[in-house]
């Protein structure tokens, strides 16, 4: 365990910034250089301090004067900042970009293929989802940013599902991928999930998942449709939403939503977090943020939460993701220094410490980093976050894939999937009519 015993490791996890400050860095001979960096304002206490300390240490060793701005995503301020800088042609040298922003701003982003290639050579390929969002038109327009990136596994109340549904998720998805039983894993499908959801709901503990105009809705519905072979558009931008697979998935959701809270159509992105923390929720699709807050406010709830793979569908097992990227604007006067910093921040040595500072929330796009012990050691319960990184046969996607990103972003942010589903499950529209509506919407995307 990285030459530290378990007690020392957990102490570091708790300390956050203290354990992340002392990092070695390469020294590059250069004249005094100035950089400005717009970073996402992390919600985990201590994570910003850890990152700031690491960057400042690198800057001192590389003759760089750096200004760091932590920008909140509350009220979409981070996205609005990037949009304003894009229009003005001025601002930070490096900016944190939301999931789809590399697509929107690619013509004003400096290619970072040299940085990406260096990391690939050292650690192996990025996950396909990161490549889809950052490698566009034959070039790396931005770099996958581990800080703030996250995925959407199931967070299941072990006790509720075991007692009321007879399902032991800890046994199916143990904290060691080598101990998985293929038969048990294969049996964890959407039919099994529905059967279990009926039972935990009958006991008074429904599954909770938003169906509204928010990202959390996309990040579980997109993978659910994909697992049945349903996609709004294909990689050639053909409209493919009108299919038997889409109708099959909607029929499934008509049944599943009968066993979910009635107010899911009004939830925001924190709705499922609140549902789990309340003690009423038996499962949600979410990164460990819900668990982290429960650990603080409802430790008895947190102690029963197990993160694990989503159910399998007829066409495979898909998990949602919401990654960030780092972009260097073309107007930056110090592009090489910016690239050197991004390379440094993306190395294993640096990421090892930043993952600790985020208490395992930050999700690297390099599978080589999934060996980090934080996900196996952080508790309660010990091993509860082990399956937060994709360990098995799940394919990580962002809703809107596999359409070209300029269309995928519209699928995502015009809330096509949750709106289509809500028209049926809440509004009473016939499934075929809702699908026809979605197809017309997609035609509009292609004309715009």
Image (cartoon, rainbow, N blue to C red):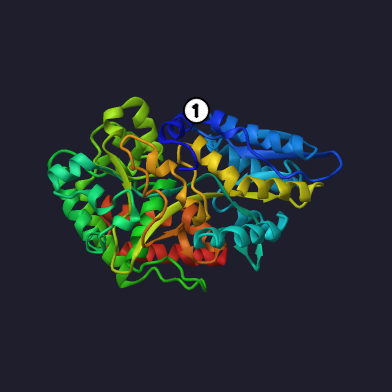
Relative to 312, is 92 above or below?
above
Q: At 43% from the left edge and 49% from the top edge, which residue is drawn?
A: 151
The percent position of residue 195, horizontal first and vertical second, equals 16, 54
Query: Can residue 83 be seen by looking at this rendering?
Result: no
| Farthest-out residue, right | 31
In the image: residue 362, left or right of residue 228: right
Residue 317 appears at what percent x and percent y? 34, 62
> Which of the two residues, 189 or 186, is positioned nearer the viewer here?
186
**The C terminus appears in which quarter of the rendering?**
bottom right
Residue under pointer 1: 15
Where's residue 73, x and y in %? 54, 37
Residue at the image position 57 percent from the left and 48 percent from the top: 348
**Between 384 and 254, which is closer to the camera in this rendering?**
384
Examine the rendering and report whether any part of residue 315 can be seen: yes
Residue 261: give x, y in percent of width and height.
24, 41
Side (left or right) of 146 relative to 398: right
Q: Quadrant of residue 378 in the image? A: top left
């Amino acid at each position: 365990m990285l030459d530290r015993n378990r007690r020392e490791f957990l102490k570091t996890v708790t300390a956050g910034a203290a354990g992340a400050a002392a990092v070695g860095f390469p020294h590059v001979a250069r004249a005094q250089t100035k950089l400005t960096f717009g970073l996402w304002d992390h919600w985990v206490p201590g994570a910003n301090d850890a990152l700031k300390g690491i960057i400042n240490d690198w800057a001192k060793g590389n003759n760089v004067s750096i200004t760091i701005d932590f920008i909140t995503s509350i009220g979409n301020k981070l996205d609005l900042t990037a949009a304003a800088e894009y229009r003005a042609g001025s601002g930070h040298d490096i900016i944190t970009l939301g999931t789809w922003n590399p697509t929107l701003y690619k013509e004003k982003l400096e290619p970072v293929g040299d940085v990406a290639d260096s990391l690939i050579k050292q650690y192996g390929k990025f996950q396909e989802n990161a490549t889809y969002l950052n490698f566009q038109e034959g070039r790396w327009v931005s770099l996958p940013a581990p800080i703030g990136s996250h995925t959407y596994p199931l967070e299941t109340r072990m006790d509720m599902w075991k007692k009321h549904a007879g399902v032991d998720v800890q046994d199916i998805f143990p904290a060691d991928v080598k101990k998985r039983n293929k038969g048990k894993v294969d049996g964890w499908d959407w039919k099994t999930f529905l059967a279990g959801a009926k039972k935990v709901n009958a006991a008074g503990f429904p599954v909770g998942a938003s169906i509204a105009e928010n990202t959390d809705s996309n990040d579980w519905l997109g993978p659910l449709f994909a697992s049945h072979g349903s996609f709004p558009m294909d990689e050639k931008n053909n409209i493919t939403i009108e299919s038997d697979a889409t109708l099959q998935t909607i029929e499934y959701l008509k049944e599943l939503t009968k066993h979910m809270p009635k107010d899911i159509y009004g939830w925001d992105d924190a709705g499922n977090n609140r549902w789990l923390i309340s003690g009423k929720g038996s499962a949600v699709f979410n990164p460990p943020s819900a668990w982290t807050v429960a650990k603080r406010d409802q430790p008895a709830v947190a102690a029963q939460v197990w993160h694990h793979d989503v159910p399998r569908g007829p066409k495979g097992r898909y998990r949602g993701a919401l990654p960030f990227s780092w972009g260097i604007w073309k107007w930056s006067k110090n592009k090489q220094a910016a690239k050197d910093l991004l390379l440094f921040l993306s190395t294993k040595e640096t990421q090892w410490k930043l993952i600790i500072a985020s208490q395992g929330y930050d999700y690297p796009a390099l599978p080589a980093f999934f060996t980090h012990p934080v996900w196996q050691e952080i508790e309660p319960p010990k091993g509860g976050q082990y399956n937060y990184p994709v360990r098995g046969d799940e394919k990580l996607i962002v809703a809107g894939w596999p359409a070209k990103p300029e269309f995928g972003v519209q699928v995502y942010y015009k809330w096509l999937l949750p709106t289509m589903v809500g028209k049926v499950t809440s509004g009473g529209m016939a499934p075929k009519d809702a699908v026809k509506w979605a197809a017309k919407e997609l035609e509009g995307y292609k004309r715009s």
